Image (cartoon, rainbow, N blue to C red):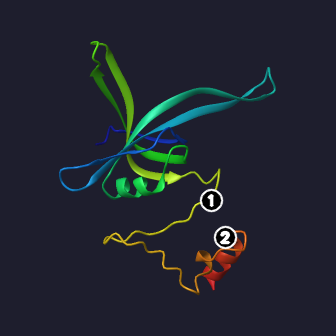
Amino acid sequence: MYNDTRISVRGYVGGQPDIYDNEDGGQTVVFSVGVTARGWNRQENRMKDGETAWYSVRCYGNLANNVAASIEKGSPVMVRGRLVTRAWKDDSGIERSRHVIIADAVGIDLNTGTARFSRVHRDGSSGDQGTSDDKASQSSEEGEIDVTEALTAKAA
């Protein structure tokens, strides 16, 4: 739709993702993301956290499968998708609402650590075969990838 509200958020996964099996054989994954604004407080001369906003994130299809295999409580993530508001009445009859992101992309936030991509083929097998001439798939003695060496090897 043309009038959809698109949103990108950066935050931390608030709990273990919930995985639901759909009638069509696919999966839906639902998790929460806490997003806390930070700003400079001039009076205190330091960074200060603001309020935390919580979003429920829903993933479907291949994205759901990959999210279920990749994230856990506390994972730093970036989420992009369509923002919708779901409203309901609780058991006491009180109107409630929740912001929900119908995700079309979820990724690990690399500002706080490293990650390694592993392509998943349609048959479900991992594409991480680690060929001997692929410098990017080889790790150094410390278990980290030398990015400069890996990029140089890829260019050669």
In the rendered image, which quarter is residue 113 located in?
A: bottom right
The image position of residue 125, as x and y in percent, is 37, 72
Seen at 29% across and 19% down, the residue is 90
Q: Mark 1 and mark 2 in contact (Cβ < 8 Å)? A: yes
Left or right of 30: which side holds 106?
right
Residue 113 higher or lower than 154, as above or below: above
Give the image location of residue 95, x and y in percent: 31, 16
Structural distance between the alpha carbons of marks 2 and 1: 9 Å
Which residue type carries mark 2?
Ile
Q: Residue furthest left?
A: 23
Where is residue 130 shown, x and y percent of the image? 53, 80
Q: Residue at x 52, y 47 (%)?
A: 78
Image-based side of 151 in relation to 82, left or right: right
Foreground of the two, 150 or 31: 31
Residue at x-position 59% and y-position 32%: 36
Q: Which residue is mark 1?
A: 114
Q: How many marks?
A: 2
Q: Helix, strand, or loop for circle 2?
A: loop
Left or right relative to 120: residue 38: right
Q: Nearer the viewer, residue 136 or 130?
A: 130
Residue matched to label 2:
145
The image quarter containing residue 142 is: bottom right
44 and 5: which is toward the camera: 44
Q: Secondary structure at mark 1?
A: loop
Chain-order first, disc 2 or disc 1: 1
How packed is label 1: few (under 14 Cα within 10 Å), some, or many (20 or more)?
few
Residue 141 located left or right of residue 131? right
The quadrant of the picture occupied by the C terminus is bottom right
Q: Quadrant of the N terminus?
A: top left
Three-letter code, disc 1: Thr
Where residue 143 appears, x then y in whole percent? 67, 69
The residue shown at (29%, 12%) is 92
